Image (tube, coloured by chain):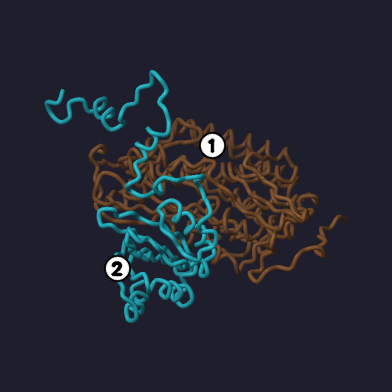
Chain colours: A cyan, B brown
Amino acid sequence: MRHILYRLKDRYHLGTPVFQRDDLCFVTVKRFELRAILTELRDVEGFTHLTLLTAVDWIEEQQFQLTYMVNNRVANLTLALRVMLDREDATGDTIHDLWPTAATYQRELREMFGITFPGSPRVDEEFILEGWTDLPPYRRDFDTLAYSQQTYNDRPGRVTHDPKTHMQKTLYADYPKGAK
Amino acid sequence: MFSFKPDRSQYPAPGPDGKIEVDLETGKYLKLWHGPNHPGITGNMSVELTVCGDEVVEGKTHVGYLHRGFEKLMERRTFIQVFPIVCRVCVPEPDFNEYCYAAAVEELAGIEVPEMANWIRTLILEMGRFNSYMMAMGGISGALGLGVVGQWMTYTRDIMLDRFEELTGARIYHMFILPGGVRAHLPEGFEGRMEEVLQTAETYLADAEKLMFHSSVFKTRTQGVGVIDPALFETYGVTGPNARAGGVAKDVRKDSPYLVYDQLDFTVHTETASDIYARTLVRFKDLHETIQLIRQILKKMPKEGEVMTNLPNVLHWKIPRGETYIKGESSRGEYGYYLVTDGTGYPRRVNVRGPSYTHAMALLEHLIPGTNISDIAALMVSLHTYPPEIER
């Protein structure tokens, strides 16, 4: 894995790689170089399998992290490329021409995180949600609890306990000491 | 013998993108919804078909009927509270979710799992694979009119669920594998009762083999139908039995062994035709392999030892910032969990990579055009997809 990263580092701006395991490495790349790196990994280095494409919302840093995980099935190596996007202008570059399955991932990211991928097939079609007009629900600032309370009514006479407080009271009544 | 030769003389010429422009006003085409409530569909999903006579011109997969926002719900729960959710991502084979999530948490939190727990985890995963394959065999035979095989397989799965109930206390969602190990040891006399189940299964499978693989009707309807070109395997992310049926001898259990798979002997079966028949045959052989693996695990596993390691107080459990990806070979292909932590007591992001995500969306939509409408159910079931993995 390291020699592949050395080769890439000669020509691209790579962040500090994090070797989670011998066969799994995470590295941050620049958005404008992503396509070239993915193409090289696929065509030259044997990373032919797109394992997943997903996003992480780092709302405190006003950024989205796109994670492109590619796998070399012969050498059993997995490389995850992180691309940081500005949260206010969440636009990614489509890779559906490299892997047709990416179109599905991008369609989901468009719906769930509001990240657009111009040129991706059917990217604006509804995927899972139907007639959704609220904030993209997988963003961190979408409050699931508030949404449920506004959208659905509680059945009369029903009591809901916060699981954390309830479990703490039930199992650890005297924690912290003196609380009882 | 009937042969399917569609009359394409009336078809409009394809556009530059190779797709046919469908104009419903011409009366040549009909939109047909296959699902979400249909015996020939795998779970709660639907395929919007455009048909011209008997031939399907276009198919679009629609999901969302089961969406409960699992990945989002996990972000609001502590690491241990996520547990009752993960197994619900896949109904017929829930244990993979438990294992992948537990292993991801353990890796990021630096927890070692006792040897005995790894053996029991492997046993549970193989029992889950047995159930999932049973559903797949029943599903494919049902889609082709062999309903009796479906009943046999359902019965066999049911007696395996009895063993699950005995071991974990639950039949469908077991919540037995959790960070740090598993909940309990095997009950007294478990091996003997499991052997009875396996022998019963083998009897029914011998009958099913005659009814399916030696039947001319089954062969006619599956051989040469729904062929996946092996060139598509990489571009469409095809894994598991769907890829093995096209000659790709890849299995995560062999290639990157996890748990105790490096101490077990098993064969990765492949076929070359890559059609519905080949995919079903690979699953059938894998099912026998699973039966042998369960016997092997029960024979080789240690008889005593700790099954759970000491965990920190799970109500105040914080895991340092990091990210990882854990994968395993489920009955449908590569199953994985991508977990991101941020140093708090809650996961920052959990992403489930289910094999159905690629098989039931891009791949199925690619395979459908040109298929006879009566083969759609068999094609779909032969990909062995479970919709909850798509809309986690």
> Crowding near pointer 2: few (<14 within 10 Å), some, many (20+)?
some
Out of B116 and B272, give the one closest to the viewer: B272
Quadrant in which the N terminus of chain B is drawn: bottom right
Given residues B282 and B46, the one toward you in this image is B46
Number of the label disc, if any, that sits on residue A143: none
* Numbered disc 2: secondary structure: loop
Q: Is residue B108 depicted above or below A97 in this figure?
A: above
Q: Residue at x 50, y 33 (%)?
A: B171
Badge 1 density bin: few <14, some 14–19, many ≥20, Cα 10 Å: many
Residue B337 in the image: state x and y as whole percent.
41, 52
Read off the residue under disc 1. B194
Q: Please, which chain is the residue tagged with disc 1 on?
A: B
Q: Secondary structure at mark 1?
A: helix
Instruction: Give residue B261's position: percent from left, percent from top.
Output: 45, 54
- Residue B112 or B354: which is nearer the viewer? B354
Q: Name the kind of residue labelled 1 in the image.
A: Met
For the view shown, which residue lies furthest in the right direction? Answer: B1
Label 2: which residue? A17
Question: In the shown orientation, is residue B193 left or right of residue A77?
Answer: right
Is residue B218 visible in this depiction of the protein? yes
Residue B13 appears left or right of B65: right
Residue A83 in percent (x, y) is at 35, 65
Q: Position of residue A137 (x, y in %)?
A: 40, 46
Number of marks in picture: 2
Is B176 on the left or on the right of B200, as rendered?
left
Outermost front residue: B25
Residue B301 can be seen in this image? no
Three-letter residue code for mark 2: Pro
Q: Chain of mark 2?
A: A
Q: Residue furthest top?
A: A157
Same-chain check, marks 1 and 2: no
User: Is A20 located above or below residue B123 in the figure?
Assistant: below
